[in-house]
């Protein structure tokens, strides 16, 4: 359990460091890559939030911690980062539309919020993407999704 917690806190620190360095301009990237990177960071932080919650629920609340799940705790923050970036792509392309009132001064908060949610709940996000793919392009859902895979 300690390995998972330390790993999650290190990765969280890395995501925060990356986000702050981008924000302060210490990491120079083309402007068109900046927002997807921020979305990845938000997705990663969402995934780590979910994992940290999983640690205390499984270790303290339900007393069912097992080392068998360590790979999940190590991989989930990375998958969440990727889902954050993918959420940007789908939102930017118009394949995902958020139903919210448009502000006079638009910001990127909707991108960050969706990326966080995509990272927080990867399985539902992937399920939504598979629904979009099925409706838009006729691509059938993956076998894992159709079997009801749960985190």
Image: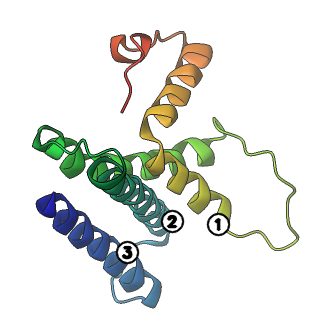
Q: Quadrant of residue 101?
A: bottom right
Image quadrant in which the C terminus is located: top left
Contact? badges 1 and 3 (CB < 8 Å) = no
Residue 89: give x, y in percent of width and height: 52, 46
Q: Earlier in the sequence, mark 2 or mark 1?
A: 2
Residue count near mark 1 (Cα–Cα under 10 Å), binned few <14, some 14–19, many ≥20:
few
Mark 1 vs mark 3: which is more N-terminal?
Answer: 3
Is residue 123 rendered to the left or right of residue 106?
left
Disc number placed over residue 9 in the picture, else none:
none
Secondary structure at badge 2 equals: helix
125 to 50, vertically: above or below: above
Q: Residues within 10 Å of mark 3 (few under 14, many from 20)?
A: few
Q: Which residue is mark 2?
A: 35
The residue singled out by tag 1 in the image is: 108
Report the quarter where the N terminus lies. bottom left
Q: Is residue 3 left or right of residue 57?
A: left
The span from disc 1 to disc 3 (Cα, nearest Å) is 17 Å
Q: CA distance from mark 3 to mark 2?
A: 10 Å
Q: Are marks 2 and 1 in contact (CB under 8 Å)?
A: yes
| Residue located beneath label 3 in the image | 29
Question: In percent of the image, x 31 and y 70: which residue is there?
Answer: 12
């Amino acid at each position: 359990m300690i390995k998972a917690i330390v790993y999650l806190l290190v990765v969280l620190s890395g995501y925060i460091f990356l986000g702050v360095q981008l924000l302060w301009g210490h990491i120079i990237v083309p402007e068109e890559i900046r927002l997807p990177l921020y979305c990845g960071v938000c997705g990663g932080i969402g995934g780590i939030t979910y994992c940290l919650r999983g640690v205390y629920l499984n270790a303290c609340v339900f007393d069912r911690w097992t080392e068998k799940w360590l790979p999940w705790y190590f991989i989930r923050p990375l998958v969440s980062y990727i889902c954050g970036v993918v959420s940007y792509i789908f939102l930017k392309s118009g394949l995902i539309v958020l139903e919210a009132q448009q502000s006079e001064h638009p910001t990127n908060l909707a991108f960050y919020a969706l990326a966080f949610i995509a990272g927080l709940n990867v399985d539902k996000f992937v399920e939504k993407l598979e629904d979009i793919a099925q409706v838009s392009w006729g691509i059938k859902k993956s076998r894992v999704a159709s079997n009801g895979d749960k985190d």
